Image (tube, helix red, strand yellow):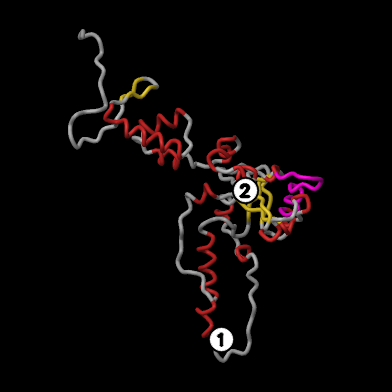
Amino acid sequence: MDRGEPQQTTGITETRNLRSKPFIQSDDQISTGKHWEDWMESMERELRYFRITDPADKKDALIIYGGKVSKIQSNRSSYRSQDFKNDRFKQNVCRTEQEKQQYRASNFRRGGRSVKKTTEDKIETDSNKDISDYELGTPVQWCSPLVVIPKPKFSKIPQDQLESHMIRACDDLRIPNKRFDRNRITQSPVVKDFAYKFHNSRVFSKMDLRQGYHKFMLHPESRSIATFSTPWGNMRPRRLIFGAKCSQDGFDEQMYKIF
């Protein structure tokens, strides 16, 4: 080989206990030796498991993360509002056909009376009850899609006959839940935990815990994270939301203080 011709260098050495990336980068192609065939097969399995098909993401998994495909998946979760305006969000989050149909309330249409109209009535009712309010004309950093499903006892009713009190409209918080931290301090009390306090009591009070999460106001800084999109504009909850994995912890803590 002439001295003027550049020599090809490899990223693999024969030195033992030396951690090096098991590939040679040559333009857009990755060449490997027989020693790394098993390693490449395991990486391909992870790519298929996480449904990563973008060539740029595959290349990042090799060059930046050394084959750790799970890091690619976690760093995808920047979760800005423009990330789920395209089909990529539905492909990565909505795995089953049923989840894809629940992705937007506008997909629920059957018969004369559509579920979209029923959902609009439900959201308008929540807005009047000070549970949530419209956020029009304001850019948002976080925004979750709206999921609409019938309540279990009304699941057999045809969709064109559903009314606003028969459906459950909530946020799809699977992506934000990956970033939320649990703050569990104590478990919610049960009757046995405080029944002994009723000894020799004569006056009792009753607490209405129906939709108990909505009894607690959200901090203003948390409302922006809980924002969800609807066909009529973004909605920002004012009360504690269902579906967030840290909501139960806050609710249990308040119940422990009360009882």
The range drawn in magenta is 108-123
Residue drawn at x 67%, y 42% as measured from the top left: 137
83 relative position to 34: left or right? right
Q: Quadrant of the C terminus?
A: bottom right
68 relative position to 190: left or right? left
Q: Nearer the viewer, mark 1 or mark 2?
A: 1
Query: Is 186 included in the stretch rendered in magenta?
Result: no
Residue drawn at x 33%, y 23% as measured from the top left: 31
- Residue 195 location (% of width, % of height): 54, 83
Q: Nearer the viewer, residue 207 or 39?
A: 39
- Residue 71 location (% of width, % of height): 40, 40
The 10 Å Cα crowd at callout 2, few under 14, some 14 to 19, many 20 or more, is many
Q: Quadrant of residue 49?
A: top left
Distance from the alpha carbon under mark 1 to that under mark 2: 43 Å
Q: Quadrant of the N terminus?
A: top left
Residue 228 numbered tag? 2
In what element is the residue under mark 2?
strand
Q: Nearer the viewer, residue 28 or 84?
A: 28
- Residue 101 location (% of width, % of height): 65, 43
Residue 198 numbered tag? 1
Badges 1 and 2: C-beta atoms under 8 Å apart? no
Residue drawn at x 76%, y 45% as measured from the top left: 110
**Can residue 126 be seen from the camera position used here?**
no
- Amino acid on which the number 2 mark rests in the picture: Phe
- Amino acid on which the number 1 mark rests in the picture: Phe
